[in-house]
Image (spheres, helix red, strand yellow):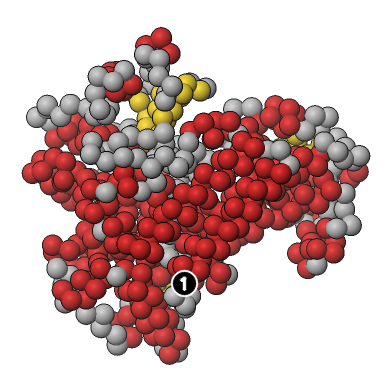
Amino acid sequence: MSKTGEFDLNFPGATIICDTLEKKRAILDYLNSKSPNFDLDLSTDNMQQTLERVIFNTTYLHEGRHLHDYLTAPLLMEHWFQKLLSLSLSVNALESFKHSSIHYKYLPLPFNQWLGLAQERKSELLQQKGISKNDVPFYDISAFREAASNELNKLSLFDKNLITAALSQIKLDEGNPILDSYNTDYSTRSFLESLAFAIQATEMVLRYGKKGVEIVDFVVRDKSFENFMSLGDKKRNGGKKIERSDYLGYTNYTSMFTYVYRFCYRNNVNQNSLYPFIAYMLFWGLCGDPKANASHALSPRNRLESFFHLDELGYDMELSKDETLYTLFRRPLDSFNSWDTIVRKAYLQHLTPVMIIQNGQFFPLSIISEGIDFRNYYSCVVQKGKELSLQLKLIGYHSLSNYINGIIGSMAYMADMMLSSASSYLYPEMYVKSFNQFVNVPFRFQFSNGITISQTEVMPNPDIIFDNGMIYKDGLRQHANSEVNYLLKSKDYIECKKYIDFCNVLFGNSLVEKPGSLIREMLPGIKPWFINV
């Protein structure tokens, strides 16, 4: 089975992948108002084909949940805000370049990696290339880390902004457990995928009834480990990393789900409450306090493992009692803070480290952070985000200001919802039935395998945007009797995409085909130099 969708933080929405003629026909029927959605027909007796079509039909909800989690879970919100900060700072550098008297011949890329190199290594690379130190920004990062404000203020405005942007990205890269992404371990990404799977599975059951139950059971029991052995062999014997291009099947999507499922079984959690409990548990793993500034302690896996080993420390969380689950489901934020307090206290009092295995090695669990003040944290992020948006507007970058303002406004909207009724978001069935009450999920169709759709095949519609081979819309109404809250707009992303691409090229996160051309366009007179470190 091929991938049906993707999510990344550059485009705040769902990417739906169209790689067959059958999917193209369904999408055309939707775009031309012949169908309220782009669902595939399920009239087949083949279980594998039915599964693939159901997965495609529920991909929008799966990817949409990723978006909503990044707007609500503190660890993910912090990561997204830091990316927006790096984007804003990179544009400040771009703006100051226009008025700078210093023009370098080369810009080493990724610049954050260049800045982080030891001075000796920088000199070595320059010598190999035959470039003078005066031809590139040549600075010692330690000077800025020790006394950033004083040292940075001595530099030209362009250098100051460029280095400030790089320092922001370095901080993001060094301190965020998001970076354990594409693998089959219990990574942050596997938390996200398993959480989205719990929601997607609920949608399957609600939409397709008995057939949906059979499909979910088929995935959990038969498909969960289909790619595990082959991918493991690639890592162990081939010595290769698992990259974005590797399709992980259902392994990555269900690894944390099945892990928590086994914990529920051992602790006699009511079978009727399994999916809600798993969803709540996974979300709590993403709720460490980012201000604690302790990367490993914030790791979702560290948080969950700490909870799962409480019985070894003499604690009984009474998860077999329905009253415990009822309290969790009704007042999740209070329960989350209670869990934080209990888990932290337990490990502070326990003198012997609790060891777990990861990647074939033992390591001790870290003491988790204190419970987060959700109201204060949400308010702080939203306020800082509004300031970023305003600063960009004041220097004339209106499209980028609108892009950031849409994301921050969406965070504010979801924060209000979480503080007033978190259960409507965290309880899977309530979330699915209330999907349109949350922030809208823009989406785009990405075509592959030789499939394309031209504008001549689609009736004129101001709500449809064709751009660079993709088709964009601002949302899909899941339920006919509900309105969509259009806070995020595809247009805002498209209009500032070149700045997003510039930031990604600057910091080594770009997927654009010709990154060097983009640098030459945005920084005329400077040649990109892609270093190999």
Q: Does residue 426 appear left or right of residue 532 in this picture?
A: left
Q: Hey, which quadrant is residue 29 in on the image?
A: top left
Q: Mark 1 — residue? A: 373
418 or 338: nearer the viewer? 418
Looking at the image, residue 355 lies above or below residue 361: below
Looking at the image, residue 329 lies above or below residue 428: below
Viewer can see residue 94: yes
Q: Helix, strand, or loop for circle 1?
A: loop
Residue at image point 17% right, 33% down = 50
Residue at image point 45% right, 86% down = 348
In the rendered structure, which amino acid carries the disc numbered 1? Asp
Give the image location of residue 201, x and y in percent: 22, 48
Residue at image point 29% right, 85% down = 315
Q: Within 10 Å of the Cα at label 1, are there few (<14), some (14-19), or many (20+) other Cα atoms?
A: few
107 or 444: nearer the viewer? 444
Looking at the image, residue 37 lies above or below residue 454: below
Give the image location of residue 382, x and y in percent: 54, 57
Q: Does residue 354 appear left or right of residue 40 in this picture?
A: right
166 or 246: nearer the viewer? 166
**Count of marks, rendered view:** 1
Q: Does residue 290 appear left or right of residue 321 in this picture?
A: right
14 or 491: nearer the viewer? 491
Give the image location of residue 31, x and y in percent: 33, 21
Looking at the image, residue 4 lies above or below residue 346: above
